[in-house]
Image (tube, rainbow, N blue to C red):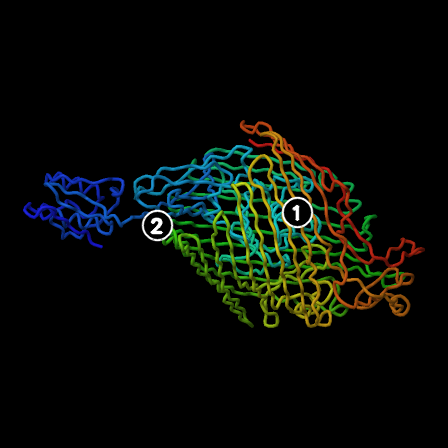
Amino acid sequence: MPTQFLLAQNGEKDILQQSYTPPSRQGTILFYIQDLQKATGINVSYSSSFLHLNKKVQLSGTEHTTGAVLNAILQGTGIQAAALNGKIFLLRESSQVQYYTISGFVKEMNSNELIIGASVYDPVTRKGTETNAFGFYSLQVPDTCQGVVFSHISYKPLFQRLPPPDDGQLDIHLETRGMLQTVVVNGEKEDVNAQAGYINMPVGYVSNFPALLGEKDVLKSLQLYPGASSSLESSSNLLIRGGGADQNLYLLDGVPLYHTGHLFGLFSIFNGDAVKDVSLYKDAFPARYGGRLSSVVDIRTKDGNMKEWHGSTTVSPVSASILLEGPIVKNKSSVSLSVRRSLVDVLYGSTLLNDYGKYYLYDVNFKLNQIIDNKNRIYVSFYKGQDKMFIRSENPIIQLFDDYNFDWTNITAAVKWTRVINPKIFSNTTATYSRFYNLFTQNSVIPLSFYDSLFVRGKGISRIRDIALRNETEYAVNNNHHISFGGSYTYHNFAPTAYHNNISAGEAMQRKAPIYYMSEFSAYAEDELSLLNDRLIVRPGLHFGALAQQTSFYASAQPRIMVRWKLPRSQYIQASFSKMTQFVHQLTTPVINLPTDLWVPSTENIKPEHAFSYSLAYQRQWSNQWRFNVNLYYKQLKDIVTTNTVLNIFDNSDLWEKKVIAGNGYNYGSEVLVEKTQGKLTGIFSYTLSWAWRQFDKLNAGKMFPYKEDRRHNLSLALKYRFNEKWSLSTSWKYASGAPFTLPVQIFPDFDWGRNIKGYLDERYSPFSTYQVNYLPYIARLNNYRLHAVHHLDIGATLNLGAEKRFHHVISGGLYNIYNRSNPFIVSFDQFSYFDNSDVYPLQLYQYSLFRTLPYLSYTFKF
């Protein structure tokens, strides 16, 4: 609205019409006011509290009077020029409140590490926002705003007085909290962005509670919260609300991962030394995420200290790790490098090699962070994880007749370019590479007769390779309106099964495994609106995905919506709906998380999987110390796949598609969380009541049956008490209902197995076929039995020495499974025999337990 001129006295010469030509077409408001006063001798009176003197303006060149110039430089400000007693007064309209945008990055004071999820909050208007995944924020404040509060759970809050508008980016540095405050939750952060179905876990939280063998694991820490569990005791295999492990989207610095387990899933590939931030979405998925059905686990690694060099080394009973980070050019570029390697083969190599076999693993995380200018930054990240396992046939404990070698590798790389286009628009462009490679070799001796044997050397390879380009853009229209949009392209190269051996084609049929070259496209848009004075938040979004290959094309529109209503006394009600589509599938073994699980794409015969997720939640917080959440959810799954065979999935003598059937699923339940987040005593209590059903036309006579990951009850209780800055004591107790198990109604002896065809049946062979009877089970229905419940009590203690000094020591110790509970790890029907075949045990159901009471002690040295 153009500025109007006010004349207080009709008889006075209109000084607003006095001739004046500015010396330049560009300048600040202050520049033109000062020049006008100097050139005309007219005093201009104003208040700098509401007039943005440093705001840059552009004139057209047609302004040649004092009034015309003031009209141009005050355009749209709601400020009027009034002539009175030979002076010009710049007066503000009482109904006008002017806003301007502050933006910048929030960093850690000691390292310049960017802080994710920091709150930026105007205490007067009670408007706020959060820093994004790259530490950037954008907030509109009124011109009367004196300052803004910056806070984060791990840092001391800071009240920052605001500089004049247009004074450039406002970068903030926060100071780390003291040891007793590391789990304080800032109440204002709850008002900004805290939602049901979402967990953001600072990496320091990982070390709060006892861990198996002292190995701190981010995925196991997430399992303390409701709706998140594991398939096996102390496994890092993350199951969300009855979904399978393959239905989780794992992102490491924005790069998708296809296998996240070390040592059969007992530990995850995410090295705690390298991780900076962990986010888990269980529902209300932001539109930028797609490709999986159950959850999104978004993990960001450390950028590297930009001020000085630091490092740490940790030794536990099973591994050793080292972290080194520091500046290449101070406050301009930094590097972070972390390496972890198992010590099992080093410390216990000779004994384990003879009895079980050889195993080792390692991880390497590398990240380069380069600041181009205050608006542009480049990140380069790299990860490689390797597992190697060799089992010899001669070992006395695992009685095998073959030599086995497993070798699986994850490699990821990413180049990110972040750009602040203007104070309201932030863009992130990423190029990524991901590769999962699994090698399996087998040396077998097959007896053909009493005098002759066949030596078979087999080699199986499964591989996935992705190359992708993605852009994400955020636009803060104002404090009540945020828009995000973007898109991506991914080139997939799948080689699911490739097995060959030294046997000629005349003795065994071999067929070249198929290789799939595919293109995946995605685009998304999301709009977040804050209505009714921030009492109502509505976030609609749409994610579009498509998969194209030579023989098939699939496209999916996936709507999302989240509605959040704020009630008095820090209470919230939230409802959400999400449709998710998954274009890739995992064919799994029925027992443990082996790397032989194969990832396969949707094809002409195998459709994509779909999930329709509904949730309703209530939240309440008391005095910034206690938090209570209850969540109800229902999820319908369509076209989910499973295998209809237990044959070797590396066997490509037939197409893998013939081993796959599709069906439907239903997951529903409720979750309760009570959390104390402040004080010397902190803790978590979580409980999940859930059901997970599956239905396949070709299985179980087409009737629904409990899914293998169905757990009726899941309960976690974890407490931590800090005596002082040195000593802390923690304990945790976990309980999970028994897993579903298929128990035959009757078992019949198969006499043909041993007597008629001497052990040859469907490519199976028994060396004891003359003495050992094979059995055929009669199964009435699937998963008709429950195994024993899994529960264990753990305790741990931590001693911090020299926390405020250059050299810092951390000693952690504890006991896992204090009351020596024998939890089922593998349950199977087995029939044992001595080597001389003189005695054969009857067929029985055996339960194998992996962990009893285990002590641990770990040491960390920081410098």
Residue 422 is marked as 2
User: In the image, what residue type sits under mark 2?
Assistant: Asn
**Residue at the (46%, 50%) spot, across then down:** 416
Residue 740: image quadrant is bottom right
Q: Which residue is mark 1?
A: 716
- Please give left or right for residue 335 compared with residue 260 in the image: left
Residue 419: x percent and y percent?
39, 49
- Please give left or right for residue 150 compared with residue 144 in the image: right
**Residue at the (82%, 50%) spot, across then down:** 394
- What whole-number distance in Å separates the C-alpha atoms at marks 1 and 2? 46 Å
Instruction: From this view, report whether residue 323 is shown above or below residue 239.
Output: above
Q: Looking at this view, is 387 or 215 the one in front?
A: 215
- For the N terminus, the quadrant is bottom left
Residue 244 is marked as none
- Please give left or right for residue 855 compared with residue 57 in the image: right
User: In the image, what residue type sits under mark 1?
Assistant: Ser
Q: Is residue 434 visible?
A: no
Residue 485: x percent and y percent?
43, 58
